[in-house]
Image (spheres, rainbow, N blue to C red):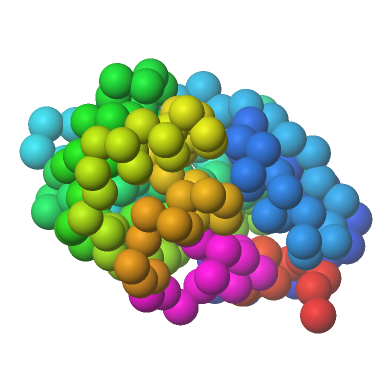
Amino acid sequence: MSALLATPDTARPLVLGSTSRYRRELLSRLRLAFDVAAPDVDETPQPGEAPRALALRLALAKARDVAARHRQAIVIGSDQVADLAGRPLGKPGTHERAVAQLRAMSGQTVVFQTALSVVCVATGFEQTDLAAVEVRFRTLNEGEIERYLRAEQPYDCAGSAKSEGLGIALLEAIHNDDPSALVGLPLIRTARLLRAAGCMLP
């Protein structure tokens, strides 16, 4: 189901289908009232699934899952996958996995694929978009990796680096067209899809 444009509706509730505090903080910048709901989605990559395809699939699955329980609401789903030469890197979860990720990304260009879906069951609206952010990492030594991880503990971040924090010191360059995408929610695209879904925004 899809719709190109919905009639503006200020009364329809907005739900962020994510428990990520980073996405919650980003969405609050748009000064819209919203609720938060946790999606129930298996995030395991499918065999041979490319990082871009994985991010798009999961963003839509999360939005659809939450929208099925909030049928009158406009629901936002999002997912981010770090793409290292076609290999997906998710949230490390542990110090050891974070060390391995940063070793692998040292001196490399990584594309952070940040996908976004907006779904409303009541109006039949469904649109998806993706912001690809190219990040070039410095060549990192073991001491730098350990000091960074001990200081920031970014174990809940895809790619093990928080660009909005100390992780910026690990990088040489960032190339993107949607500045908040690397943190977890591309707000330029989010605003565009929300307007199309009927939200009142400037």
Part of the protein shown in magenta: 175-191
Left or right? Give the position of 147 relative to 125.
Answer: left
Left or right? Give the position of 148 relative to 3.
Answer: left
Residue at image position (51%, 72%) is 178
Foreground pick, 34 / 75: 34
Farthest residue, direction front: 143
- Residue 101 position (above or below residue 44): below
Displayed quadrant of residue 54: top left
Residue 189 among those drawn in magenta: yes
The image shows residue 27 at horizontal and vertical percentages of 71, 54
Residue at image position (59%, 72%) is 188
Displayed quadrant of residue 143: top left
Q: Is residue 122 visible?
A: no
Residue 62 among those drawn in magenta: no
Left or right? Give the position of 110 relative to 114.
Answer: left
- Residue 32 position (above or below residue 92): below
Foreground pick, 114 / 161: 161
Foreground pick, 111 / 35: 111
Left or right? Give the position of 72 relative to 131.
Answer: right
Number of disc labels: 0
Residue at image position (57%, 55%) is 164
Q: Is residue 202 visible?
A: yes
The image shows residue 95 at horizontal and vertical percentages of 37, 22
Farthest residue, direction right: 11
Foreground pick, 165 / 11: 165
* Quadrant containing the C terminus in the rendered view: bottom right
The image shows residue 65 at horizontal and vertical percentages of 54, 32
Displayed quadrant of residue 194: bottom right
The image shows residue 48 at horizontal and vertical percentages of 9, 38
- Residue 198 position (above or below residue 160): below
Residue at image position (29%, 20%) is 96
